[in-house]
Image (spheres, rainbow, N blue to C red):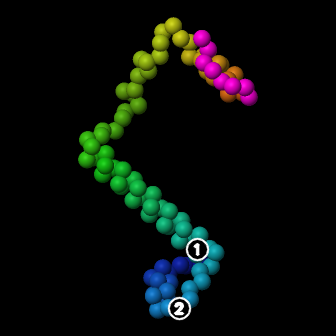
C-alpha cells in the first residue's frame, strides 16, 4: 500500500498544482473520511443523549409484558410468514 501524505496533497492543491491520487490513495482517503464522519455522528448523538438525560438501556431490564395472554406468538409469526409469502391484498384476520 502506498503511503498517502495528506498534508503534501493539500499543499499541492492549494498551490494550484494538479493532484491525481492513485486509486489506492483515493480509497484510503474515502475510508478515513467515512470513519471521521461516523465518529462525529456518534459524538453528536452522545451529546444529544446527555442533554436530554437519556440513560443506557440494560437488556436484562427489558421485559415483554405487552403480549396479550390469549394470543400465541408462534401462531402470529406463522400468520405473518403466510401473509408475507402471499402476493394478494393483505388484511388482518377477524
x then y, percent, for residue 39: 42, 58
Q: In this view, does 30 lie above or below 85?
A: below
Label 2 close to label 1 by CB (< 8 Å): no
Q: Is residue 50 above or below residue 39?
A: above
In three-dimensional space, the C-alpha distance between marks 2 and 1, rounded to whole angstroms, equals: 17 Å
Q: Quick one: label 2, few (<14), some, or many (20+) residues within 10 Å?
A: few
Residue receiving disc 2: 17
Taking depth in this image into account, of 41 and 31 the one nearest to the observer is: 41
x then y, percent, for residue 45: 36, 50
Q: What element carries label 1?
A: helix
Q: Quadrant of residue 11?
A: bottom left
Question: Please, what is the dominant secondary structure of the magenta stretch?
Answer: loop
Q: Which residue is drawn at 41% across and 31% down?
A: 59
Q: Which residue lies furthest to the top in this view?
A: 70
Report if residue 92 lies within the magenta region: yes
Taking depth in this image into account, of 87 and 17 the one nearest to the observer is: 87
Which image quadrant: the N terminus? Answer: bottom right
The boundaries of the magenta stretch are 86-94
Which image quadrant: the C terminus? Answer: top right
Taking depth in this image into account, of 81 and 74 the one nearest to the observer is: 81
Sequence order check: which comes first, mark 2 or mark 1?
2
Q: Which mark is residue 26?
A: 1
Q: In which quarter of the image is residue 56?
A: top left
Count how many numbered circles sit on residues in the image.
2
Report if residue 53 lies within the magenta region: no
Q: Is residue 81 visible?
A: no
Q: Quick one: label 1, few (<14), some, or many (20+) residues within 10 Å?
A: few
Q: Is mark 2 on a helix, strand or loop?
A: loop
Q: Residue at x 47, y 12 (%)?
A: 68
Amino acid at each position: 500500500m502506498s503511503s498517502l501524505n495528506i498534508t503534501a496533497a493539500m499543499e499541492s492543491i492549494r498551490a494550484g498544482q494538479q493532484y491525481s491520487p492513485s486509486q489506492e490513495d483515493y480509497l484510503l482517503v474515502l475510508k478515513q473520511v467515512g470513519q471521521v464522519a461516523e465518529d462525529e455522528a456518534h459524538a453528536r448523538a452522545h451529546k444529544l443523549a446527555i442533554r436530554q438525560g437519556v440513560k443506557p438501556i440494560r437488556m436484562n431490564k427489558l421485559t415483554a409484558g405487552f403480549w396479550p395472554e390469549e394470543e400465541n406468538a408462534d401462531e402470529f409469526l406463522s400468520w405473518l410468514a403466510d401473509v408475507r409469502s402471499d402476493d394478494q391484498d393483505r388484511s388482518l384476520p377477524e
